[in-house]
Amino acid sequence: MPLNKPPLPDTLKKSPWSNLLMLLFLVASLMVLYNFFGEQKEVETLSYNSFKTEIGQGTIKEIMIDKDQVTAAGRRVPGQKPHYYRTVLPPFQDKAFFDLLEKHHVEIRVKSQKESALWVALVSMLPWLLFLWLIFFFASRMRQHMDNVQGGLLNFIKSTAKKYEKRRSAIGYDDVAGLENAKKELAEVVDFLKNPVRYEQIGAQIPKGILLMGPPGTGKTLLAKAVAGEADVPFFSISGSEFVEVFVGVGASRVRDLFESAKKEAPAIVFIDEIDSIGRARGAGIGGGYDEKEQTLNQILSELDGFEPNEQVVVLAATNRPDILDPALLRPGRFDRKIILAMPSKEAREKILQIHTKKVRKEASVDLAKLAKLTVGFNGADLKNLVNEAAMYAARQKKEKVTQDDLLYARDRILMGIEQEFAMDEKDKKRVAIHEAGHALTALLLKHADPLEKVSIIPRGWALGATEQLPKKDMRNFPQSYLLDKIGVMLGGRVSEQILLHELSSGAANDLEEATALAVHMVCQWGMSSEIGPVHYKRGEEHVFLGREMAMPKNFSEATAKLIDDEVRMLITQKEEEVTRLLNVHKEELTLLAEELQERETMNKEEIEILLQHSKKTSSAE
Ligand code: ADP
Ligand code: MG
Ligand code: ZN
């Protein structure tokens, strides 16, 4: 991801080459320095004549001849610095000169030409080396600069796909908990990548493109890596979000590069993560980068189509928005195999917790099965986060081991936000207690509601209080009675305020929003209104896995719109009336619970049941 790559420090960026050049540079400068200081000896430059005169006077002890250069050392005179001379030999034979040397017993040394030739060659190469080094230095500087600015033109075109070594990737199936179905389906691919010949011989064609679909954090990326690990093949991965580039055409060339490298290393896996960010249905693009995405997508399509039948490259892709993918991607021969990764069940959650607590020192009393039960709606990433939060919390308290309480603390923190440290005044506290007591008691009284777990009036995140229910099991399908009682519990807070305070507050806004959204679903999509009947009306484009809606033109008339609104309102008001009747009947218990809650701030299910049974006994005894 060149765009997000943090700038590396200079020392890390340099290639080994530039280190070598650096060394050469150092040596060169040392030599220059040596020569420079060499000059500092007192060397007298003489004319050839004067030099001969000096010899004649017997002041010279020895000479060194290097081609036409002559350096001479004077005889030592005690108390004086040694004296040096220099001159240049004339380009003709001067027999008299050598006779003179002989006569005055001057030591003659001649520098070997072989040695000096090497020396000269080295010296003459120096400027070039320096020059090269400079070019290198600036080039790397440039590249670094480009990297910082916009991804670096050089890296830019090259795919940023990470290539994992051709050895077992560190991740295998053991690191992925649950997802048994997905693993089973992918086992086929693993087997193919391990024994491609067997498949080829029998004439079987393995699906080229496999799309992993599922909510965020369910382990799509993890599973893809695990497949590569199991199959023991190179893994080339790239993320769709990396293609949000400025220059058109770059994404496409990266895709081309990616597939080329993978084919060279076949058998191999190509993994395109978050493919929805490029593979969004064409023409449905919102915002910029449209051309770029289109080209990138086209390149992916043509790469998929361009596979030879016996190419041993499997393309995995992951998305949490399969609904918006371009249909062209899903055509047979492309991503025709789809694997759904579901939210983890209770058992899977326990296994995920086991995996992530492996490296955490924990007390023997830690009960992961119980924690798994208490983490309905948590995905793999949430659970990993939970374990880490708990470990950090334990460390902050200077504990040696993580306890169950630490894990539960982390769970509450993730689920409801961090506890707020502001003090509510008694009046506010009373109101919140009454509101939450209403939710809690409704949850206890309504037969189909999720069982009550805990109620608290400690402010967390945005909420002033919270009532927590725990589904008996992981639910995939919701009966009408369950949904109606869910709406009832949501309304319980507001009804309780109305009964005990005879006044409403803004605190129920969120409850009403959720209740309304649920009612709309029941009426428009699940055919649970007799007036509307078994018709599906789309109110917005719904993200299958994100549970969010986007604005979209409605596909029904104004008259139907009014009918829907009426039905939704009726459904909610009817439920509100029912809950009002119910809480009025149990007004004493409601009051008692609210008062106790105001006192204790947090109560769990057992505490509430004991309190209410106690009150029943005393009231029946009276
Ligand atoms: P996705 O790609 O579906 O959004 P990831 O694969 O990135 O999710 O999962 C995020 C992290 O959550 C993973 O690194 C892993 O540690 C953890 N995780 C998710 N699902 C599982 C699982 N089934 N088993 C173990 N760890 C999981
Ligand atoms: Mg992912
Ligand atoms: Zn509420």
Image (spheres, rainbow, N blue to C red):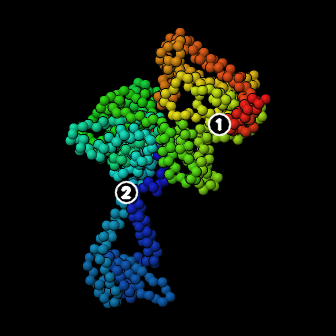
Is the residue at mark 2 in contact range of ligand 2, meaning its CB lies under 8 Å from it?
A: no
Mark 1 to mark 2 CA distance (whole Å):
77 Å
If the image is split into quadrants, where does the N terminus sit? top left
Position above or below: 33 against 585: below
Say which residue appears at 59% left-offset and 46% top-offset. 407
Is the residue at mark 1 in contact range of ligand 3, meaning its CB lies under 8 Å from it?
A: no
**Neighbourhood count class around disc 1 (C-alpha, 10 Å): few under 14, some 14–19, many 20 upward:** some
Q: Position of residue 163 (x, y in %)?
A: 37, 47
Whether residue 257 appears in this view of the structure is no
Earlier residue among tags 1 and 2: 2
* Disc sitting over residue 466 in the figure: none
Residue at image mark 2: 132
Say which residue appears at 67% left-offset and 29% top-offset. 441
Q: Position of residue 514 (x, y in %)?
A: 59, 26
Say which residue appears at 55% left-offset and 23% top-offset. 481
Q: Amino acid at mark 1?
A: Lys
Whether residue 522 appears in this view of the structure is yes
Q: Along the horizontal axis of the image, is 392 left or right of 244?
A: right
Q: Secondary structure at mark 2?
A: helix
**Neighbourhood count class around disc 2 (C-alpha, 10 Å): few under 14, some 14–19, many 20 upward:** some
* Residue placed most toward the observer, 167 or 520: 520
If the image is split into quadrants, where does the C terminus sit? top right
Q: Position of residue 65 (x, y in %)?
A: 32, 78
Between marks 1 and 2 in the image, the one whose residue lies nearer the viewer: 1
User: How many numbered callouts?
Assistant: 2
Q: Amino acid at mark 2?
A: Leu
Q: Residue furthest front?
A: 621
Q: Quadrant of residue 470?
A: top right
Position above or below: 322 against 105: above
Residue at image mark 1: 605
Say which residue appears at 32% left-offset and 82% top-offset. 109
Q: Secondary structure at mark 1?
A: helix
